[in-house]
Every structure is written in structure tokens, then in C-alpha cells.
Amino acid sequence: MDPAQRAEQILVESEAILRRDHFVYVTGEHGDGWVAKDAVFPHTDRVDELCGMLAEAVSGRDYDYVCGPATGGLIVAQWVARHLDRPALFAEHAKEEGYVPEHAGDGPLRAPFVLRRGYDEAVRGKRVLVVDDVVNTGLSVRETADAVRDCGGDVVTVACLCTRGNAAAGDVGCDDFVWLTEVLVPSWPAADCPLCRDGVPVNTRYAHGADFLAQQGAA
């Protein structure tokens, strides 16, 4: 079985692929599917296998660090770094004064990712592999890549366990974009969402539905 098929099999076995519901993504776009990576993370054998396959997929490049956006990308960064025998770092959401979903307007539902804790100094002049669990629109990995570059690092590759097929190299902020498997899920701007039009309730357990409803309540 090739890595793409095996990765999808692991997601299915973990019951991580959710469909036919109403989800809101961090960009504010809506869609009817979600990859619940948190269903995979408790199974460390599966995480180890997935991240080993991702490390193999990006082998042949030269990296000094592996970096992922918290929280899911942090876990992937740790495991991939272990397979590549490199140190791991993570980016986290900026603690912007007053940044709450209710004030986000039509923009992203979270503050951007930044490097802190000395990681901003560590990446200066270094070659970095940016990883994540699932790429939905590319926003999280793009902000992580931007954070690395803002600190003087060189983003060589962006890689993920799974992509929803909505993001290309330009969306993730790197020409070298690698993924294990693809789960196709369409998405739409909130204003054009057919699920909103049909009155389908927003899922608040997964993705950013709760943030979206809080934003709507403040509008």
C-alpha cells in the first residue's frame, strides 16, 4: 500500500473524516467536511507511522529545524523531527490586545501565528521545514512560514499529513508543498454558504463554529 492510501486508511480507521455537516474554518469560510485530527493523536502508533511517512516524503532536503503551528502542528513537528533527527519548534497565536472573534470582522477567527520562547532567535539564518496536521485553506502554515521568515529563517518546505485540496503552494507560502493524502472538501465564503441559506446548524464541536457564532452575535 502506498503512503497516500495508508494515510487515508489511518484517518478512516480513526473515524477522523467527518462529512455532511456544517463547519466553519479559521479563515471564516464554510464547508460540509472536516478532518478531525484529534481523533488520531491519542493513538501514538498511528501518529508515529504517519509522521514517519511524512518524514520520508520530505527526505533529501536539508533542514535545521522542524516547526509547526500549535496545537496540532506542534505534535506533528515533534514526531517528524524525531524521524528526521532534527530539533522541533512551534509557532503560537499572537496575544494581541483586544483580539477576540467578536472583533475579527470578516477576517480570520484567530490572531496570527508568531514565534516566541527563543524560537524566534533559533531560526535566524536556518533552514526550516514547516509542518501541520491538516491543511484546510493554508492560513495556519502560511502564517507560520511568515513568522519564520520574519525572524530571519529560510522556509524550505511546507508539508502536512492531509490536505483538503483547497490550498496550493501560493496559499501555504512555499513553492515546495508536500502532503501524504488528500481529502477533498469544498468551501465557500460565509456570505455564499448554501448551508447557512438552508438553515443547517453550525457545528460548534469541531473547527471554528463557536467563534463564528460569537462573531455573528456581536455584529
Image (cartoon, rainbow, N blue to C red):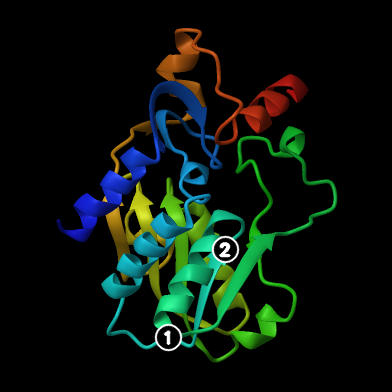
**The disc labelled 2 sits on which kind of residue?**
Leu
The residue at the far bottom in this view is: 125
Left or right of residue 75, residue 91 in this image: right
Amino acid found under the numbered disc labelled 1 = Tyr
The foreground one among 29 and 132 is 132
Quadrant position of residue 109: top right
**Relative to 79, is 167 above or below?**
above
The residue singled out by tag 2 in the image is 74
**Residue at (39, 60) in percent of width and height:** 160
> Looking at this rendering, what residue extends furthest in the left direction?
1
Residue shown at the point (55%, 92%) measured from the top left: 125
Please name which of the two marks, 2 or 1, marks the residue nearer to the observer.
2
Above or below residue 140? Residue 176 is below
Which one is in front, 196 or 43? 43
N-terminal-most mark, 2 or 1:
1
Mark 1, residue position = 63
